[in-house]
Image: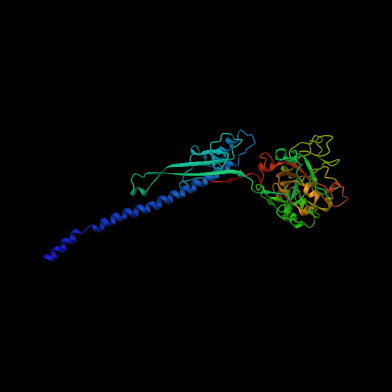
Amino acid sequence: MKTVRLKVMRSRCQRGAVAIMFGLTLVVLIGFAGLAIDLGRFFVIKTELQNGMDACALSAASQLKPGASDPNVFTRAEAYGKVFFKTDVDNAVKNKVNFQSMVPNPDLLQITFANSNDGPFNVTDANVAKFVKCQYPLTDLPIYFMQVLNPLLTTQTVSAMAVATRDIPLASCLPVAVCSDPGSGAGTNFGYTVGQWATAIDGSSYGTGNFGWAGLTTPGSSNQLKDALTGSSQCDISNPSQLVYGSGLKAGLTKEWNSRFGVYAPSMNPNDAPPDHTGYAYSDAPGGNWLPVPPATQGFNVYSGTNSLNPSTPNFGTAVANNLRYDSASPQPPDFPVSQYTVLSSDELVALGRNNRRVVVTPIVDCSAWNTTPPEDKNLPVQGWACVLMLNPYDESGPPTAPRRKAKLEFLGLASDPLSPCAAGSTFAFAPVLTQ
């Protein structure tokens, strides 16, 4: 009897132990579950906020123009960075956070500038600002489950940051080389004046002030050059050790060159070789359509200038805006056998044309080595990169001195110049890229 009584008393003493153990275990389980839930929630919010900072930095960096002496750079950059967080901008894609339930306050968005990726981000001179940082502290986010472990944990702050700059690692390149003026450097545009015309192809050898065929990746065969002309050849213009390969006097490239003007030989398909949005061509030959300063011997600044002899002659910007076809030019480039080609209409230039097929980048090299030895035997280092406008189609028929045999380019500045067309608003412009 005594033994039975002891067992009953012991059983009564153990009652509730399981409940206590379960309660303690439940607190721990809720704490860990809450830790996972709250941390997971903050991770999602952090990702949303980071997307917003990336968009802010990239958009703000698109406005940086170091060296351009533009006093409004910071104002535009900050406006571009904040546009994704402003509720009064109807057409902007808002970067919402907290499970897409709120738009961060743009007044709390921190946008700062530096001249290097590592900072410090305290630059106040827009002329030297090369990097922009967007940072946002999202404060007072409520903590729900982790309070079980620590009642003092009531709110949390989540921050995100992004840094961006403008860069041009790749550019749309034309497979011709610009011959630099001996002794001239980047400070003098390697001997060229913005707006100056130079002969690109004339059936003769390379020479100072002229251009010539060149391979951008390998010693250029005719097939490689054709592919570059009809396609979208790219080169790394940030690579200071890149080489250009002399390709000598190449024949049979007229069809590919002319395709950029919407002028096609019978064997060519415009879908395989897209044109620019205008084929309007310019000539400085006697009786040509662009002799702006009498008694000038060649044209100048057709890209944005005015022909003083005939102010009604459209410049390139006007030609693009109106999708003018090649044979809209009056007079047309001398004795070009247009009847042997198909010329796209304005509507076809709208439908098939692409931006910047005639405003392109070319490498600048010292061509003197190509004048002393066969071009195929020399690969030359790139001295710089020129932004040029292709002025006219050409044809290889007729006598060697015929104007139709000359293809010309206009020098628009160095591609690295933030004011050149190749760095301001073009498809191969300084593109904003994230660095942090």
Residue extending farthest left: 1
Coloured how? rainbow
- Above or below, 143 against 293 in this view is below
Tally the marks: 0
What residue sits 52% from the left and 47% below the top? 51
Q: Nearer the viewer, residue 333 or 384?
A: 384
Residue extending farthest top: 71
What residue sits 58% from the left and 34% below the top? 125
Quadrant of residue 132 within the rendered picture: top right
Visible residue check, residue 422: yes
What residue sits 54% from the left and 43% below the top? 163
Q: Is residue 313 left or right of residue 43?
A: right
Horizontal and vertical percent position of residue 433: 59, 46
What residue sits 50% from the left and 44% below the top? 161
- Above or below, 416 against 264 in this view is above
Residue extending farthest right: 399
Visible residue check, residue 94: no
- Above or below, 237 against 69 in this view is below
Horizontal and vertical percent position of residue 91: 57, 42
Q: Nearer the viewer, residue 121 or 432?
A: 121
Horizontal and vertical percent position of residue 295: 84, 35
- If the image is split into quadrants, where does the N terminus sit? bottom left
Q: Is residue 115 left or right of residue 302?
A: left
Horizontal and vertical percent position of residue 302: 76, 40
Q: Nearer the viewer, residue 33 or 368?
A: 368
